[in-house]
Image (cartoon, helix red, strand yellow):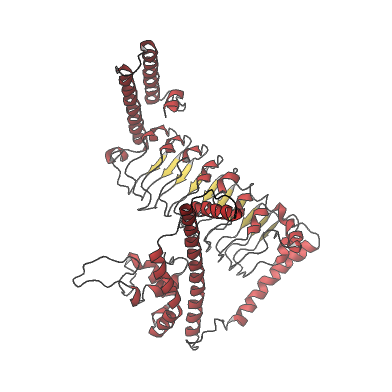
Amino acid sequence: MDPAPQAHPILSYVLSRLPTLAKARPAGGGGDFDIEQPPVHTPSPRTPSTAGEFELVERMPGLRHPSVLRAMTRAVADVSAARSALQVLGPRPDHELVDSSRAIVAATDAEAGGSRRVPEGDLEACRAVVRLEETHDAYEALLQEAEGRLEAVYRSAMEGKDLEEPDGRDESAAAAAGDDAAVQEEVIAVLRQAEEGKPVESVRLVDRQLRHLPEAFGRIQGLRVLDVSRNQLEMIRNIGPYAKCVRYSKCYRRLDHLEELRLASNALISLPDSIGLLLNLRILNVGSNRLRSLPDSISKCRSLIELDASYNGLAYLPTNIGYELVNLRKLWVHMNKLRSLPSSICEMRSLYLLDAHFNELCGLPSAIGKLSSLEILNLSSNFSDLKDLPASFGDLLNLRELDLSNNQIHALPDNFGRLDKLEKLNLEQNPLSMPPMEIVNKGVDAVKEYMLQRWLDILLEEERKSIAAAESPQAPTTPSAWLARSVSWVSDVSGSLVGYLSGENKTEKDAYLDQQY
């Protein structure tokens, strides 16, 4: 694991310049290229791979100063050591595997002294998975702390302070206090209106440089919309009641009417577990923050119809999110670091839109075809990770728009032709061999027709094999039964194909084909 440039830009910049971590390369330029430690070079706006780095040093030109870089290098010594250890440990385990391992370990510990149902070897493997996950969590906390230290070093350097002892305090706080005063007056006016008993159903404090959300917002009765997007919030503590605190429980249960909560474009690193108590919440937008995970309790927001968690650092979604968010219609999780989607997501029978582009998805849940209401699906730009689509993909019969571009998909599922309602299809930048590119270039209708014919050919071949097996001397012979079945099957399939190609039955499913599939 390496720090993500989006979440830890300064740390990534400094680590890329630590010579002790780079692999020595043989003379003549041979050997393996370490993608995590590219050669040191001067950033250039014309080099695509360093575009983000160039933007950083343009915004913070002091990073180029040797004394600043030396001070920052000293500040991240522990990070570089931990990073080396993680490279030995290997990648982070799958979230669902971690959850199941924790459950097994907890159940075994609870039965201490009783009969052990889990073999010792399996139990130790579960404990190893949990320990590895905890190590990765600790490393991520270390990264967050290191990024803060580096920011303090940079501020100190730009203010002419001693780089050896940065105090991390911005002396311009007094000036900022003047700007905060105007914002506070606006906040106080809203709260005074609520205290006077006047109805306050909507509070919109967008782009106000808010650094914290006052507790009193939790006492606004009847509040339905709270929009504090584009601020500087790093933590939210008063969105829902805290189960272990009577005072908070009394205070914040008045947010029970909240239907729309917008926290986008802040600096949030986590959401409180208490958010799950917002039972009437319908729209939640936490996009463009620094979230690494969503709390499991978010699954309790059963009224949610829209959830936007895009542009964060999410490595997984809550394991049970799909079992309880059964009313969710739109889910945006693009621009994250998702390696997989939980299998429970297949239970979101109301899901209309799923956008998971630009992640690290290695595949989809095998039961993805159960999303019977899905009409828009974007899985583009998972690059080298997404190589296959599950066989149930052909069950997404209501799918209208599909983007699979910029992946490594070699073949579409055989039953892809069943997607009769598909109107928009993007297959660019894939090494497709099935269907052939000459078919792909003709458009979505040509792809559907080609894949439908291929699927029917496969079913016909399977039936021929079945008939041949029935005619075999080793097989019990019941001529009338298999002959009647075969004639009926061929009649049904040919009728369906003719109906599809003529456009008469394009919107109807063939019951026998479903049975065969």
Which x, y percent locates residue 247?
76, 63
Which x, y percent locates residue 500?
39, 25
Q: Residue furthest left?
A: 28
Which x, y percent locates residue 343?
50, 45
Q: Residue at x 37, y 12 (%)?
A: 478
Classify residue 91 by image quadrant.
bottom left
- Give 247 or 168, whichever is nearer the viewer: 247
Q: Is residue 413 left or right of residue 266?
A: left
- Against 271, is 385 above or below? above
- Against 514, is 175 above or below? below
Regarding residue 324, the answer to whether it shows in the image is yes
- Give 225 or 304, whichever is nearer the viewer: 304
- Against 297, is 191 above or below? below
- Give 228 or 336, whichever is nearer the viewer: 336
Q: Say how many tags the image has.
A: 0
- Against 198, is 463 above or below? above
Which x, y percent locates residue 347?
54, 41
Q: Is residue 30 left or right of residue 243?
A: left
Q: Residue at x 35, y 16 (%)?
A: 476
Classify residue 515 by image quadrant.
top left
Which image quarter is the N terminus in? bottom left
Q: Residue furthest top?
A: 480
Q: Residue furthest right?
A: 196
Regarding residue 334, the answer to whether it shows in the image is no
Which image quarter is the C terminus in? top left
